[in-house]
Amino acid sequence: MNAHDEFLKQYGKGKKNLSVRESFCPYRVCPLGAHVDHQYGLVSGFAIDKGITIVYAPTAGAVRLRSLNFEKEQTFHIGRIPTPQRDWADYLRGAAWALERRFELKRGLNCVIEGTLPIGGLSSSAAVIIAFLAALCDVNDVHVSRADMINIALDAETRYVGVKVGKLDQSCEVYSQKDKLLFLDTKTDKYELVSPGPKTPPFEIAIFFSGVERTLAGSAFNVRVDELKAAAYALKGWSEMDYGKFEDTRLREVPLAVFEKYAERLPENWSKRARHYYGEVARVKQGVEYWRQGNLKKFGKLIFESGHSSIHNYETGSEELRTLYELMLDTDGIYGGRFSGAGFKGCCMALVDPAKRDAIAQKMTTEYLRAFPNLQDKFSIHFCQTSDGVQL
């Protein structure tokens, strides 16, 4: 059953002239720029042609939520949004909370939510927030810019749900255009949609879902963010920079030369996290140039290097994801690949040659399930195209 059928089953009985509407937000992948947006680093990304669909109709103020991915209906009322409940609907409550802080909302909605890929690593949290925000704006006749949508969605996830994300996910899902690489400075919010070089070979995005889901709020994600901030704070102090408040500190404010001078003073983990940050920012800059040239071989090599740094410097990745990464390194037809998202379980993404799709799928499936036969019914591979961001 799809979201539209489920909506009519749950909310359409006996109702005439029901105004059923639909919003869609794509998922995103980040080839280069992982784990640096919360430090105001440089990032890159694509939206893909899979994502979150919400089928909805307006109400007088009540919000009733159903998901094809989770059991149990969730409810709340516009104007009386509860504190976080630590369940899947917190992202929707957070969206309403963040929008209501800026606009007067009078109407709620009944809705059914459907995700087209397994949860974990594609920023489904940002996608469901943005799709729900678009629906709430629609029924309340609220009009927001793309930049405002990004900031409202960010508030929902950081200030309500409590995950210390940056702007990468939301920006990819709002600004992206098909086949163009989003290049974003998360400190200034300046961005460029970079067209591939004229000699760029055909490519697709492959998603290798490990079969193991994850939740950012319950992972070590926030710890990694704090380690980077702590490194930045210490480096500022040793170099006699103005360090201000800890919560306002970002590694973007610390020059590479300062890190290189004082790196040995840092605790090992802080130093490794910072090394990942500086290396990743350099990879984004170089990767954008390779993309302009249409050199997917060199662009993909940087993606693999990003994955290596995420494992050894940022120290993310379950056993399952590390196995997928090693398999991608040794698979013909994969230009480059890495963990997708935070790297705590979930999935890997890869830039691939579509002519070798079948061989890639066969090898990755055979060798991964040889290592994890218990995930036979959960492991999956999805080949996607790049796409435009959300339509507001």
Image (cartoon, grey):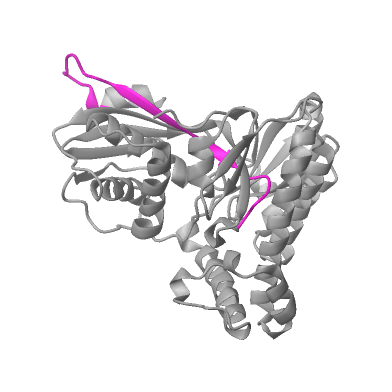
Quarter of the image containing the N terminus? top left
Q: Which residues are magenta?
A: 10-35
Quarter of the image containing the C terminus? top left
The spot of residue 166 in percent (x, y) is 50, 55
Name the one closer to the observer, 107 or 69. Answer: 107
Please say whether residue 56 is one of the residues in the magenta stretch.
no
Name the one closer to the observer, 232 or 94. Answer: 232
The spot of residue 138 in percent (x, y) is 28, 29
Name the one closer to the observer, 364 or 184. Answer: 184
Can residue 303 be seen here? The reply is no
Task: Determine the residue positioned at 54% across, 50% down.
Answer: 213
Residue occupying the far top of the picture: 17
Can residue 191 be seen here? The reply is yes
Task: Determine the residue positioned at 68% across, 48% down.
Answer: 32
Left or right: 116, with 286 as reference point = left
Left or right: 26, with 323 as reference point = left
Left or right: 353, with 242 as reference point = right
The answer to whether residue 163 is above or below residue 208 is below
Residue occupying the far left of the picture: 60
The spot of residue 23 in percent (x, y) is 38, 28
Please say whether residue 34 is one of the residues in the magenta stretch.
yes
The answer to whether residue 352 is above or below residue 170 is above
State the count of labels.
0
